[in-house]
Image: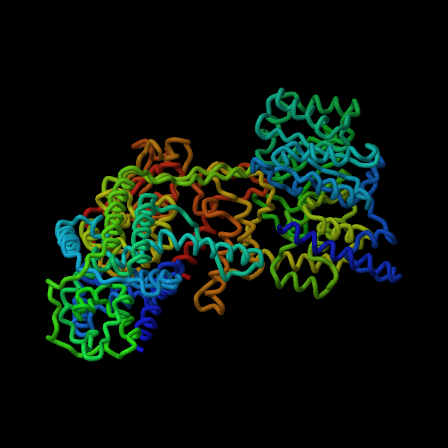
């Protein structure tokens, strides 16, 4: 019964969170974004005390059910493990292992140092919910969007408006490669040994384990009833039950209740057991050699990931259309920016990257193709803004509505008009007023802040062509000018981020 | 795909017609079936009083032929379909074909040559033009003239036009045709018989037109091609274009035969506002909306031929119905159309006839498609006006999605730089950048939810 409740709740969270990452229309975010805000690490970085206290209390009372229900990466591993267990002869495939202390606390310590020292790439890489989010955003979302585009194609043929196409583009190749590498490792580990990742690498799992050891309710072995059949042991994907010693390692138990459901003798009970039977750290458990090997694979993957980061440059598809009567279009290229641009609603570039766990929820919510994971090492996989495919539209505050980590604070479109995240500057030699000798005021015409002033190209000659200049105090950094600039592939006007965002 | 669907519909109609004939119900075959109709009635012909040419009142405009993509992704004329269209037109009595070296990125003449050269040269009339807008040097002009013979596979032109004069007035005319010696040359060619009729096509204001008519004393225009339809008859803006009524009366006074272009305003008069279309259907439920426009022009006796740029077979079939056993409009019906024209001027459509002379826009915009999409939405009452309006959300979504479908994002109005390079090419003298900015401002309001 408990197991079924666990599975039902996990299914609800898992499906809703996955769909939220897939949905690009902004419909589901309104309903499910609280599920993202319930995630542990984002809550910590957002200093969301309510959620942290709630999760701690839940863990202290019920154990690590967070890992089995709320964390989508945990549930993903359960699904993989379940599929693996359906193979012939693999139903009872687990063997107990001892806690991999050195690795577990080592990774955790490293993680804490990374959070404090601001090594954002490492924090993002290890964050479990964000790992899953990146997987959906980079791998599943394109498939979902292609499926959608097929329906959009049908809708177009049929003259209906139920579906519209979504541009599918490679937002960051290094990120994609890192995500795929990471997911291959996690999937292989789950396929072989269940929850190895959660109990050896995951820093959130380790953090919660400090509390779950003292949980009030936990699965307890009734030694009087236990016939030493080892069924629970072999079904324990956390490998934390030691029947020889009649002990359960509650630091690793994720409250999946598979043991309870599988005990034929009613010897396993989930009950109030506060202060009793705390597992001895010295418990003698056989080391699982398979696990050690898999761990090695995990480490290799991390090394490989770093190599991708260093070695790859993003490829951008050229959007060339030869259409006879139409001029060729030259695709825009991402320009160099003195300071990167981060979303409206973040306080500063530094604060944004300090809090962001690179879950990509904002990237999947951005309807204007502005946000994408960055490819450079310092902020690897954390989002940044660029305006080759769209600009940050005045009516849109989607990213601020979904961010669970407090990196982007919730704002309204009205508040957005008073925020400044960047400032545009004109490269006059690229401007078509100079280059082609024609009049153009497309940037000025589309500036939502009215920050662009057209002035005579030749000072003192009011009859000369007008060229754009930026009134820095008005510019908000939305990128409309850069996106709509007719100069290609590099726009004649570009936005540089502000280190400290201005509110007025 | 669109094309195919329409062809399928057409085949259905044809099939039904044939079935009706087979059943022996000869008198009541569906009106759509031109082949059936032409059995009992005749194509309307007009005789050119100056030389006795017997010209079909329906002329084929070769500016809007169907295009397909070749393997390099370029637009090329779908010659197979063009041959089928010309076959059907020819066999049903259409004998006037109007092309230009500039049409369809320069491919129209050759396609017309291929399709028409399969028939005896003395059974149809060819009209083509001296379209020297860009290069008006003597060499370029002469080459353009000589090339047309090769493309059209002929050694004489029945009707030869100085293409699109009016804008720029006499000075521009002088630059294109007089200073380079072209006019002198063309007059000689007329004497030699290589040009049977010499005329011009006109877009512009009244003063320019008066000037060109005065030149009749010098050059003896054999015919003049004007833009004429029931809207432009009395509702040209007067500043950039002159009322067709004036043009017609002036030419009528001088007894100069008139050929007519844009009888349908590039198809716009077949996609008119819903309530106007309903008024027409109320009177003539079985006649197409377009047929009113053709009957309006054809009902004027000085008209030699009415050019229609028929892209699809069903355009041709419908027009054949109109011009076979042609029914003249009564005075009352003329007044009715005038009333409709007044109604239609209330709508904020753009006067674009989709001639594509403005293209290619150097900044990648698809100008005619942007206007077409906007006009269609206006005419179909699909403009979202305010949040208070019933069904606003649906209209808003429809407008934005259909806009993206009609015009790729990077070719939409928000990319117009306002450089004004297109304006001088527009025969309708539309202030293109202003209109694009107007549409862009509307779209921006829709997107931002400011309505």
Q: Position of residue B363 (x, y in %)?
A: 46, 38
Q: How many marks?
A: 0
Q: Is residue A75 left or right of residue B127?
A: left
> Is the residue A7 above or below the residue B73 in the image?
below
Q: Position of residue A225 (x, y in %)?
A: 22, 79
Q: Is residue A59 left or right of residue A87?
A: left
Which image quarter: residue B124? top right
Closer to us: B159 or B150: B150
Closer to us: B440 or B243: B440
In this picture the colour scheme is: rainbow
Q: Position of residue B57 (x, y in %)?
A: 78, 45
Q: Residue at x 17, y 61 (%)?
A: A285
Q: Is residue B91 left or right of residue A435?
A: right
Closer to us: B51 or B287: B287
> Is the residue B349 above or below the residue A495 in the image?
below
For the question of whether residue A280 can be seen, the reply is yes
For the question of whether residue A414 can be seen, the reply is no
Q: Quadrant of the C terminus of chain B?
A: bottom left
Q: Is residue B164 left or right of residue A303?
A: right
Which image quarter: residue B417? top left
Q: Residue at x 11, y 75 (%)?
A: A276
Closer to us: A443 or B171: A443
> Is the residue A396 above or below the residue B75 in the image?
below
Q: Position of residue B309 (x, y in %)?
A: 68, 44
> Is the residue B17 above or below the residue A217 in the image?
above
Q: Residue at x 82, y 51 (%)?
A: B35
């Amino acid at each position: 019964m408990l197991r079924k409740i666990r599975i039902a709740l996990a299914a609800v969270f898992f499906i809703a969170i996955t769909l939220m990452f897939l949905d690009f229309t902004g419909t589901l975010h309104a309903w499910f974004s609280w599920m993202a805000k319930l995630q542990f690490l984002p809550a910590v970085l957002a200093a969301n005390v309510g959620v942290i206290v709630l999760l701690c209390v839940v863990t202290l009372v019920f154990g690590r059910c967070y890992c089995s229900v709320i964390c989508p990466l945990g549930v993903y591993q359960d699904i993989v493990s379940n599929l693996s267990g359906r193979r012939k002869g693999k139903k009872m495939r687990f063997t107990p292992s001892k806690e991999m202390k050195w690795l577990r606390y080592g990774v955790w310590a490293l993680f804490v140092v990374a959070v404090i020292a601001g090594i954002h790439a490492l924090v993002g890489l290890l964050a479990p919910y964000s790992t899953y989010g990146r997987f959906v955003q980079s791998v599943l979302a394109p498939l979902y969007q292609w499926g959608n585009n097929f329906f959009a194609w049908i809708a177009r043929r049929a003259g209906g408006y139920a579906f519209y196409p979504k541009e599918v583009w490679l937002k960051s190749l290094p990120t994609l490669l890192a995500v795929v590498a990471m997911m291959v490792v996690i999937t292989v580990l789950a396929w072989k040994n269940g929850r190895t990742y959660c109990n050896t690498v995951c820093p959130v799992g380790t953090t919660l384990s400090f509390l779950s050891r003292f949980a009030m309710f936990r699965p307890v072995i009734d030694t009087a009833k236990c016939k030493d059949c080892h069924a629970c042991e072999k079904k324990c994907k956390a490998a934390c039950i030691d029947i020889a010693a009649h002990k359960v390692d509650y630091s690793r138990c994720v409250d999946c209740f598979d043991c309870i459901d599988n005990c034929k003798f009613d010897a396993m009970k989930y009950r109030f057991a506060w202060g009793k039977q705390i597992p001895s750290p010295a418990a003698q458990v056989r080391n699982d050699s398979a696990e050690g090997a898999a761990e090695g694979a995990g480490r290799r993957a991390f090394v490989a990931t770093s190599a991708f980061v260093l070695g790859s440059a993003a490829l951008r598809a050229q959007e060339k259309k030869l259409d006879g009567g139409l001029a060729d279009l030259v695709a825009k290229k991402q320009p160099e920016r003195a300071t990167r641009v981060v979303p409206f609603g973040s306080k500063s570039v530094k604060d944004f990257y300090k809090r962001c766990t690179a879950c990509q929820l904002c990237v999947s919510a951005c309807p204007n193709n502005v946000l994408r994971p960055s490819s450079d090492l310092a902020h690897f996989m954390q989002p940044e803004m660029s305006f080759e495919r769209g600009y940050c539209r005045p009516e849109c505050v989607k990213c601020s509505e979904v961010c669970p980590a407090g990196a982007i604070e919730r704002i309204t479109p009205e508040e957005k008009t008073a925020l400044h995240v960047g400032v545009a500057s004109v490269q006059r030699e690229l401007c078509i007023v100079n280059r082609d000798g024609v009049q153009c005021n497309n940037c000025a015409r589309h500036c939502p802040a009215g920050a662009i002033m057209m002035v005579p190209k030749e000072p003192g000659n009011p009859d000369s062509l007008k060229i754009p200049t930026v009134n820095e105090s008005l510019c908000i950094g939305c990128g409309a000018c850069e996106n709509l600039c007719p100069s290609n592939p590099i726009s004649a006007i570009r936005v540089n981020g502000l280190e400290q965002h201005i509110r007025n | 795909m669109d094309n195919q669907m329409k062809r399928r519909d057409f085949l259905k109609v044809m099939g039904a017609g044939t079935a009706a004939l087979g059943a022996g119900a000869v008198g009541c075959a569906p009106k759509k079936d031109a082949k059936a109709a032409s059995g009992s009635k005749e194509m309307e012909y007009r005789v050119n009083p100056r030389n006795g040419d017997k010209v079909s009142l329906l002329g084929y405009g070769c500016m809007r032929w169907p295009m397909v993509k070749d393997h390099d992704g370029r637009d090329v004329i779908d010659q197979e379909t063009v041959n089928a269209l010309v076959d059907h037109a020819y066999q049903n009595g259409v004998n006037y074909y109007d092309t230009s070296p500039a049409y369809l990125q320069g491919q129209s003449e050759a396609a017309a040559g291929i399709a028409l050269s399969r028939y005896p040269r003395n059974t149809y009339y060819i009209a083509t033009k001296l379209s020297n807008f860009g290069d008006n040097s003597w060499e370029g002009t002469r080459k353009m003239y000589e090339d047309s013979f090769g493309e059209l596979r002929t050694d004489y032109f029945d009707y030869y036009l100085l293409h699109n004069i009016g804008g720029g007035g006499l000075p521009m005319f002088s630059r294109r045709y007089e200073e380079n010696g072209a006019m002198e040359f063309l007059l000689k060619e007329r004497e030699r018989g290589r040009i049977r009729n010499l005329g011009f096509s006109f877009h512009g204001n009244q003063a320019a037109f008066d000037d060109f008519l005065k030149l009749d004393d010098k050059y003896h225009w054999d015919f003049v091609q004007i833009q004429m339809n029931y809207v432009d008859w009395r509702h040209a803006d007067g500043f950039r274009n002159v009322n067709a009524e004036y043009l017609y009366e002036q030419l009528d006074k001088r007894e100069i035969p008139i050929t007519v272009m844009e009888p349908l305003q590039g198809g716009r008069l077949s996609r008119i506002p819903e309530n106007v279309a309903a008024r027409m259907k109320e009177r003539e439920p079985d006649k197409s909306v377009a047929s009113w426009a053709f009957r309006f022009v054809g009902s004027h006796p000085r008209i030699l031929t009415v050019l229609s740029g028929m892209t699809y077979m069903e355009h041709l079939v419908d027009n054949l119905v109109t011009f076979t056993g042609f029914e003249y409009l009564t005075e009352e019906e003329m007044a009715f159309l005038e009333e409709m024209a007044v109604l239609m001027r209330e709508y904020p459509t753009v006067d674009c006839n989709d001639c594509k002379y403005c293209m290619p826009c150097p900044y990648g915009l698809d100008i005619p498609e942007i206007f077409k999409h906007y006009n269609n939405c206006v005419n179909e009452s699909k403009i979202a006006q305010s949040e208070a309006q019933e069904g606003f959300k649906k209209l808003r979504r429809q407008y934005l999605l259909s806009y993206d479908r009609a015009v790729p994002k990077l070719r939409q109005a928000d990319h117009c730089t306002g450089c004004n390079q297109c304006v001088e090419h527009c025969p309708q003298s539309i202030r293109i950048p202003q209109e694009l900015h107007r549409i862009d401002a509307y779209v921006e309001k829709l997107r931002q939810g400011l309505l």
